[in-house]
Image (spheres, grey):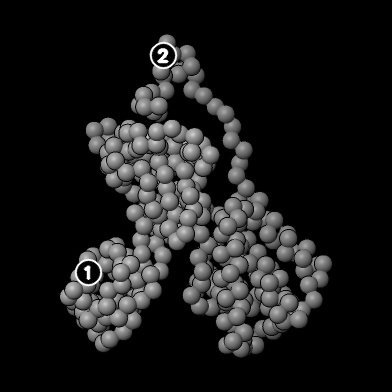
């Protein structure tokens, strides 16, 4: 089990700026934590640093081929939480508030979301009852996209699962770039499920464009690179595969060395590159091997691959 404290003290020890048993100054600890979180965000942008894909499942809206994706902080609003009640009262409703957004604050249970709100009455209805009555406070909220999840940096794979009639059949989808999407002449053409997806990583919500336009409410299974999560405090536990703790300590040490006046020696750089190299090798994608089903090749059926596309191409 690795904590932020372990990573920070390991990094400082690597540059001889910390001794076992020594207490970290509060300001130094916060500065090191901020640098560590910046490093985690930066590493998330590199496929070589990402160790897994995340699968999220959504439902298409029939006739809609453009969707926003993400869930970003909308700031705070004034309100009062009451123990045992799902209603936040005396609320000043922001114009940007949307249902399904997450809520945080004293007395608000973990995972609570916005079910509805009434600006005239100054109320927000939560998905769970309050667990305390702290009085007036500032309550945090998020603004979700059509598909609510952490805004992905990259979409790696996707498929559609039919949930009606031929239930359980999965149809693959090709991830394409902007140039290919732009080249499609009539983007709103309707079909039971899309065959192409272009992801435009706009801010603060990303944008997904599908072709063809899904005509039913089937399931979208979306795979994206796992984002390395920031640490809320030095006591936060971080779960990583083998090799990551060493890599993060070395990379963080390199970031902190100039602030602590430490000399970054060739040996330190060699050990850092070695640690990072092991992780990059772990995350390297294997080269795909072409294969085919001999039974399909020998078949006299003119469209033996119909099960993959249903004839909609």
Residue 89 % position (x, y): 21, 79
Whether pointer 2 and pointer 1 mark residues with C-beta atoms closer than 8 Å, the reply is no
Look at the picture and state if 133 lies above or below 58. below
The residue that appears at 54% across and 27% down in the rendered structure is 291
Q: Quadrant of the C terminus?
A: top left
Residue 286 % position (x, y): 61, 41
User: Residue 165 or 122: which is nearer the viewer?
Assistant: 122
Q: Secondary structure at mark 1?
A: strand
The residue that appears at 39% across and 62% down in the rendered structure is 71
The residue pinned by badge 1 equals: 117
Look at the picture and state if 154 lies above or below 107. above
The residue that appears at 36% across and 67% down in the rendered structure is 142
Residue 296 % position (x, y): 45, 18
Can residue 106 be seen?
no
Picture quadrant where residue 253 is located:
bottom right
User: Residue 7 or 100: which is nearer the viewer?
Assistant: 100
Q: Earlier in the sequence, mark 2 or mark 1?
A: 1
Please tell me how crowded label 2 is: few (under 14), some (14-19), or many (20+) other residues with Cα within 10 Å. few
Picture quadrant where residue 99 is located:
bottom left
235 with respect to 49 (left or right): left
Can residue 135 be seen?
yes
The residue pinned by badge 2 equals: 302
Residue 28 % position (x, y): 62, 84
The residue that appears at 68% across and 76% down in the rendered structure is 256
Single out the mark in the foreground, 2 or 1. Answer: 1
Name, please, the residue furthest toward the right: 266
Picture quadrant where residue 285 is located:
top right
């Amino acid at each position: 089990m690795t904590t932020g404290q372990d990573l920070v003290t390991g990094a400082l020890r690597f540059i001889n700026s910390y001794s076992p048993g020594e207490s970290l100054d509060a300001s130094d600890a916060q500065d090191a934590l901020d640098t560590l979180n910046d490093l985690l965000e930066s590493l998330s942008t590199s496929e070589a640093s990402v160790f897994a894909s995340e699968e999220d499942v959504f439902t298409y809206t029939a006739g809609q081929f453009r969707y926003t994706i993400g869930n970003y902080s909308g700031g705070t609003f004034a309100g009062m939480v009451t123990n045992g009640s799902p209603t936040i009262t005396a609320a000043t409703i922001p114009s940007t508030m949307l249902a399904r957004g997450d809520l945080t604050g004293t007395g608000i249970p973990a995972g609570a979301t916005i079910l509805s709100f009434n600006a005239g009455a100054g109320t927000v209805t939560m998905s769970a009852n309050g667990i305390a009555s702290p009085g007036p406070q500032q309550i945090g909220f998020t603004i979700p996209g059509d598909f609510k999840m952490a805004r992905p940096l990259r979409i790696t794979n996707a498929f559609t699962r039919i949930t009606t009639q031929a239930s359980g059949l999965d149809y693959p989808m090709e991830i394409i770039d902007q140039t290919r999407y732009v080249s499609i002449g009539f983007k709103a053409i309707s079909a039971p499920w899309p065959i192409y997806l272009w992801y435009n990583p706009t801010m603060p919500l990303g944008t997904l464009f599908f072709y063809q336009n899904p005509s039913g409410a089937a399931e979208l299974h979306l795979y994206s690179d796992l984002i390395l999560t920031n640490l809320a405090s030095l006591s936060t536990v971080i779960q990583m595969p083998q090799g990551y703790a060493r890599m993060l300590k070395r990379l963080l040490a390199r970031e902190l060395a100039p602030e602590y006046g430490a000399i970054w020696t060739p040996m330190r750089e060699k050990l850092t590159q070695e640690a990072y190299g092991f992780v990059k090798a772990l995350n390297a994608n294997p080269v795909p091997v072409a294969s085919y089903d001999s039974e399909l090749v020998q078949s006299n059926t003119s469209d033996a691959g119909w099960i993959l596309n249903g004839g909609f191409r």
